């Protein structure tokens, strides 16, 4: 399939592979698990790749049908992602307000930890790369609530669709969605990655490792 056409999930995975944001091999995660793949959204490090990624986010959100008024990017990776998505929506004819937070509150100038449009009274969409432990998302939700905004949902690039811990039978994304009563939209998940790997000659050799990883750590 051509890289610039087709389903947004496939376009995203093609883009991630080309940018080396998606790699295959053996990677030790922060959790200590040995993963056959690794995703790093920081490798979308050019204007063209970020613009193409933002289009995938926008298509996923359109498919999900979530209503929102403002984009919020949690520091740090969420900031360029939310900014790129705001630009993509402007390109499509919708001018959305944008805000993000600082890791440390500013004591001079305008002060505070928030930058950008005011959140009060807005339905706020959080834009990030992944949800791992959910800590960054919980912090973002607290910031939004304190500023008078209403969380409308979360959009991420990739959902690993694996259990947070061995004894827990839900993923980090599921835990956040259930715990806060908001939708989590992923551009693609592990299931999409498996299908993608099975359709590309150069990736077929990784499929067995992906299947074994899902069997051991995946959610039902």
Image: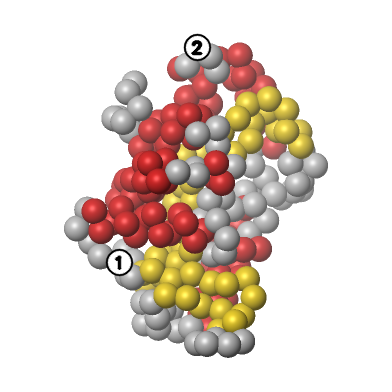
Establish if 38 lies above or below 41. above
Residue 105 sits in which quadrant? bottom right
Establish if 176 lies above or below 143. above
Graded by Cα atoms within 10 Å as few (under 14), some (14 to 19) or many (20 or more), the crowding at tag 1 reads some
Establish if 73 lies above or below 174. below
Q: Coloured how? A: secondary structure
Q: Quadrant of the C terminus?
A: top right
Indicate the position of residue 179 as horizontal and vertical percent values.
58, 65
Q: In the displayed structure, does residue 120 sit left or right of residue 195? A: left
Residue visible at 63% across and 35% down?
A: 38
Separation of disc 1 and disc 2 at Cα? 41 Å
Under circle 2, the secondary element is: loop
Under circle 1, the secondary element is: loop
Name which of mark 1 and mark 2 comes first in the sequence: 1
Residue 140 sits in which quadrant? bottom right
Indicate the position of residue 90 as horizontal and vertical percent values.
25, 58
Residue visible at 56% across and 79% down?
A: 113
Q: In the displayed structure, does residue 164 sit left or right of residue 179? A: right
Graded by Cα atoms within 10 Å as few (under 14), some (14 to 19) or many (20 or more), the crowding at tag 2 reads few
Indicate the position of residue 216 as horizontal and vertical percent values.
71, 32
Indicate the position of residue 69 as horizontal and vertical percent values.
32, 70
Establish if 68 lies above or below 112. above
Q: Quadrant of the N terminus?
A: top left
Q: Which residue, as the protein is rendered here, is positioned at the far left? A: 93
Nearer to the camera, 79 or 216: 79
Residue visible at 42% across and 40% down?
A: 49
Residue 216 image label? none
What residue sits right under mark 1 in the picture? Answer: 96
Residue visible at 49% across and 43% down?
A: 44
What residue sits right under mark 2 in the picture? Answer: 201
Q: In the displayed structure, does residue 197 sit left or right of residue 214? A: left
């Amino acid at each position: 399939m051509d890289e610039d056409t087709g389903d947004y999930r496939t376009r995203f995975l093609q883009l991630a592979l080309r940018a080396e944001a998606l790699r295959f091999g053996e990677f030790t995660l922060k959790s200590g698990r040995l993963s056959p793949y690794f995703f790093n959204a920081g490798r979308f490090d050019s204007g063209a790749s970020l613009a193409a990624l933002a289009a995938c986010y926008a298509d996923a959100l359109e498919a999900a049908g979530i209503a929102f008024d403002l984009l919020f990017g949690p520091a740090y990776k969420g900031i360029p992602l939310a900014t790129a998505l705001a630009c993509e929506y402007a390109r499509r004819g919708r001018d959305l307000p944008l805000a993000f937070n600082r890791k440390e509150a500013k004591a001079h100038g305008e002060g505070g930890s928030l930058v950008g449009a005011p959140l009060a009274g807005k339905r706020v969409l959080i834009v990030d790369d992944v949800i791992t432990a959910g800590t960054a998302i919980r912090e973002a939700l607290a910031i939004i609530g304190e500023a008078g905004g209403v969380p409308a949902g979360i959009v991420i690039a990739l959902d690993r669709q694996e259990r947070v811990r061995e004894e827990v039978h839900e993923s980090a994304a599921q835990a956040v969605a259930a715990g806060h009563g908001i939708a989590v939209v992923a551009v693609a998940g592990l299931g999409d990655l498996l299908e993608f790997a099975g359709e590309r000659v150069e990736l077929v050799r990784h499929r067995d490792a992906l299947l074994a990883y899902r069997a051991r750590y995946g959610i039902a």
